[in-house]
């Protein structure tokens, strides 16, 4: 079995690191990824993904990434659980970034 994703897209906004109570650092980024095919109207749709980076990789990404920059991200998926106020348990996939490849671009 292999748990793996790779996305190539542009950052929707500048990254911001949050520090958790136990000293761990986390950063969520939004990545806009254009589809490689046209829809029925002849347009290319865009999907938006949220990717989580932890500790060193969060620091590194925050220092090197800017809004609109193209970036390639490799990572893994894991299930996250959240208990809702009504008592229901919500399980959803999270995208965890493990590697980043930066691309230079001119503004």
Image (cartoon, rainbow, N blue to C red):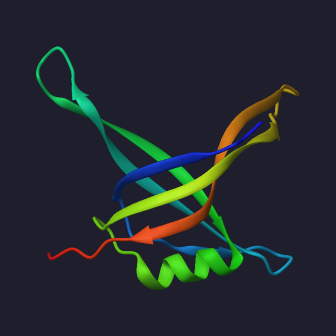
**Which quarter of the rendered picture does the C terminus lie within?**
bottom left
Q: In the rendered image of this protein, does residue 64 appear above or below residue 35?
A: below
Q: State the image coordinates of residue 10 (x, y, percent, origin top left).
A: 32, 58
Q: State the image coordinates of residue 27 (x, y, percent, origin top left).
A: 60, 68
Q: Nearer the viewer, residue 61 or 104?
A: 104
The residue at the point 70 percent across, 34 percent down is 92
Q: State the image coordinates of residue 77 (x, y, percent, origin top left).
A: 68, 44
The residue at the point 15 percent across, 76 percent down is 106
The residue at the point 63 percent across, 45 percent down is 4
Q: Nearer the viewer, residue 59 or 72?
A: 72
- Decide if residue 31 is on the left or right side of residue 28: left
Outermost top residue: 40
The residue at the point 21 percent across, 74 percent down is 105
- Decide if residue 50 is on the left or right side of residue 81: left
Q: Nearer the viewer, residue 62 or 85?
A: 62
- Decide if residue 94 is on the left or right side of residue 13: right
Q: In the rendered image of this protein, does residue 81 appear above or below residue 96?
A: above
**Which quarter of the rendered picture does the N terminus lie within?**
top right
């Amino acid at each position: 079995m292999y748990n793996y994703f790779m996305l190539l897209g542009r950052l929707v906004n500048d990254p911001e690191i949050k520090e958790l109570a136990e000293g761990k650092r986390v950063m969520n980024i939004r990545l806009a990824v254009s589809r490689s095919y046209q829809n029925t109207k002849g347009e290319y749709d865009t999907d938006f993904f949220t990717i989580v980076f932890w500790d060193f990789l969060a620091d590194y990404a925050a220092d090197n990434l800017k809004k609109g920059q193209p970036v390639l991200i490799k990572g893994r998926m894991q299930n996250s659980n959240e208990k809702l106020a009504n008592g229901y348990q919500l399980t959803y996939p999270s995208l965890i970034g493990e590697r980043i490849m930066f691309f230079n671009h001119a503004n």
